[in-house]
Image (spheres, rainbow, N blue to C red):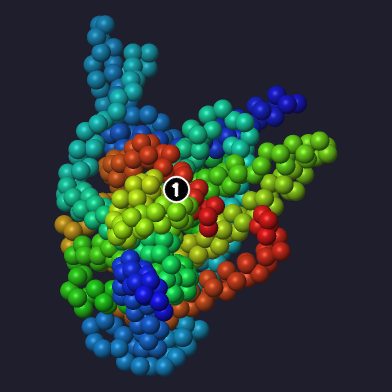
């Protein structure tokens, strides 16, 4: 290594040192500790005791674990495609020559900005079975609205509805990508007599496919970790009865999302080892789904020029 | 046909926009009502006061007394009940403390994030050194790690440091550059021509001076984006305060609001909505003042990602 190279090495390391320290203390150490805890019986107060794969074994027979996994996959399977499609639809509409585009964009973006606690409060109120406005709007069309938050069939749809409402940032990302698609492509398609539908499928979708992929992956990661809405809507005082731990997850635990159950195991039941095992299982599920999504879309994604 | 399509386009967009706004307007409307008007079926759309006409002058009456008077004598006027805000703040007890804690955390995390991410991003983009790119790949990979994986050990770590029940776990980490922000800033730094740094180096400028006096001023918009996102994140964060804070006086606004709701058991909707509006309003106002920076930042994450 020449003197200049050595100097640069020291300089570079000095500049990135805040990240290195943070990485070691707040990422690498927790990851390693988490692996270790996942093989331990650990209640925070006493020292962790090695129990081998017992936590992972316990998960197989834990009905609440399976329920939470099912709820989370259900939630993701509906909310993610719906968010991606609706956001794309709105973005395509806004990409036409629309008057007041930036005002529309701001309005659509607004729900994703509102602090999640505040938006959960208003949705608790909107979805209230007796006094909520959603049911009274439905009654205009002679539809008897369900008890959204108290009926186990409707708790997950409620969470999905909220996720769609707050999907404005996905829309903004799409819109930015759409605005980068060269106009000339559309013009040449028009000369060839392409209609709006063929232009959408043969120009728009391929050109923004990297961004669709990006939103899909980010969506998978975020959606599987959804915590706050489930915690706030389904363990607060609004539903009444029982201790906090019993209440969590709504009627018949139908809104017990994975991250919520994990939180409960860690901080209500003080089973840090079990919670760590659950966290690693979640990580593996995320990795698997990301891999599967990458693999199945690989040939559909167009990276300009490559 | 063309006209019809345009009408349809605006109709769909307007309907969607209305759906986005309705919950927020409903929050505000409920937050401005007296409690009786929150409990009616069908719902009352606007807060109002009821008056009865007696000899030309109007006397206010309670809505419950309305059936004592002939309906043609009754006058309904839209009247927001602004007092709800003050009363909700008082009902939450520690609201000023929540606000103070939230602002302290926002300030510290914004400073910490902007400083540390800018430094790290500079090291990852403007200096050539051996091992830089593999290390940056590790940084990118850490973004994949879900929070639940690190949640338990971090809690245990902060517990052993005696930080549980203090604000420390919520801001100290921000001084150690999160990968996401480093990534965002690095993209900006890479767009600045290399020659600029080279020229300064030949003039004998130290690397730190190049960073402070050349690169940072050119990257103000990017630093704004990072700062703004961090502010939003800290203001909105729920799970962090939920895990680390134990005393009510130390709560942030987000946690305080949830605590208020779980305590009063979902009966005083007018106060709850007024309080929610107070928590949401600063973010909405901030957004309207910084809209351009904001949208650019969001768009950037997608395109460069």
Q: Quadrant of the C terminus of chain A?
A: bottom right
For the N terminus of chain A, the quadrant is bottom left
- When asked about the image quadrant of residue B291, the answer is top left
Camera-side residue of A43 and B127: B127
In the image, taking residue A58 as reference, residue B201 lies left or right, namely left
> In the orientation shown, which residue stands out farthest toward the right?
A192
Q: Nearer the viewer, residue A245 or A37?
A: A37
Q: Chain of mark 1?
A: B
Q: Name the residue rendered at 63%, 70% in the picture.
A: A292
Q: Position of residue B26 (x, y in %)?
A: 40, 37
Q: Which type of secondary structure does the marked residue at label 1 adopt?
A: helix
Q: In percent of the image, x 70 and y 60: which residue is there?
A: A300
Q: In the image, what residue occupies the spot 77% across and 39% down?
A: A188
**Placement of A269 over or under B90, stated as above or below:** below
Residue picked out by circle 1: B297
- Give x and y (percent) for residue A102: 50, 34
Residue in view at x 40 percent, y 64 percent? B127
């Amino acid at each position: 290594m020449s003197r200049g190279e050595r100097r640069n090495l020291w300089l570079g390391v000095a500049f990135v040192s805040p990240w290195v320290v943070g990485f070691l203390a707040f990422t690498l150490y927790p990851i390693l500790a988490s692996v270790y805890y996942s093989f331990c019986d650990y209640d925070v107060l006493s020292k962790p005791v090695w129990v081998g794969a017992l936590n992972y074994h316990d998960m197989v027979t834990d009905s609440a674990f399976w329920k939470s996994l099912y709820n989370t996959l259900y939630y993701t399977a509906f909310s993610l495609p719906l968010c991606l499609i609706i956001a794309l639809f709105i973005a395509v509409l806004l990409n036409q020559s629309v008057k007041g585009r930036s005002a529309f964009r701001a309005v659509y973006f607004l729900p994703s900005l509102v602090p999640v606690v505040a938006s959960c409060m208003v949705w608790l109120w909107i979805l209230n079975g007796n006094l909520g406005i959603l049911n009274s709007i439905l009654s205009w069309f002679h539809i008897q609205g369900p008890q959204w938050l108290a009926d186990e069939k409707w708790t997950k749809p409620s969470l999905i509805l909220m996720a769609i409402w707050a999907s404005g940032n996905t829309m903004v990302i799409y819109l930015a990508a759409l605005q980068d698609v060269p106009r000339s492509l559309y013009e040449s398609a028009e000369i060839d007599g392409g209609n709006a539908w063929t232009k959408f499928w043969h120009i728009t979708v391929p050109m923004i496919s990297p961004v669709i992929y990006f939103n899909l992956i980010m969506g998978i990661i975020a959606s599987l970790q959804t915590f706050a809405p489930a915690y706030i809507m389904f363990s607060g005082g609004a539903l009444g009865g029982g201790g906090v731990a019993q209440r969590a997850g709504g009627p018949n635990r139908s809104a017990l999302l994975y991250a919520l159950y994990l939180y409960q195991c860690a901080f209500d039941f003080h089973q840090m080892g079990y919670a760590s095992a659950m966290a690693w299982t979640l990580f593996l599920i995320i990795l698997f789904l990301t891999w599967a999504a990458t693999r199945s879309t690989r040939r559909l994604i167009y990276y300009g020029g490559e | 046909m063309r006209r019809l399509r345009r009408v349809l386009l605006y109709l769909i967009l307007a309907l969607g926009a209305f759906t986005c706004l309705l919950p927020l307007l409903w929050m505000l409307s409920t937050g401005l009502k007296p409690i009786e008007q929150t409990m009616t079926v069908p719902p009352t759309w606007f807060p109002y006061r009821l008056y009865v006409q007696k000899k030309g002058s109007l006397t206010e009456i309670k809505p419950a007394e309305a059936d004592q008077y002939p309906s043609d004598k009754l006058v309904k006027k839209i009247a927001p009940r602004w007092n709800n805000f003050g009363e909700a703040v008082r009902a939450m007890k520690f609201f000023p403390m929540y606000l103070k804690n939230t602002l302290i955390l926002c300030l510290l995390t914004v400073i910490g994030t902007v400083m540390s991410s800018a430094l790290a991003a500079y090291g990852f983009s403007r200096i050539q050194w051996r091992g830089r790119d593999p290390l940056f790949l590790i940084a990118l990979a850490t973004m994949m790690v879900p929070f639940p994986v690190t949640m338990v050990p971090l809690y245990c770590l902060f517990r052993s440091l005696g930080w549980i029940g203090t604000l420390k776990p919520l801001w100290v980490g921000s001084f150690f550059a999160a990968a996401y922000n480093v990534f965002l800033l690095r993209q900006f730094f890479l767009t600045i021509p290399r020659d600029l740094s080279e020229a300064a180096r030949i003039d004998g400028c130290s690397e730190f001076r190049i960073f402070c006096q050349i690169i940072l001023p050119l990257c103000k918009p990017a630093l704004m984006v990072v700062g703004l996102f961090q502010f939003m994140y800290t203001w909105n964060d729920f799970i962090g305060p939920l895990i680390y804070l134990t005393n009510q006086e130390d709560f942030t606004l987000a946690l305080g609001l949830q605590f208020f709701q779980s305590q009063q058991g979902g009966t005083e909707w007018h106060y709850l909505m007024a309080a929610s509006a107070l928590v949401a309003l600063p973010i909405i106002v901030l957004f309207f003042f910084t809209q351009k920076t904001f949208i650019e930042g969001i768009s950037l994450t997608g395109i460069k990602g």
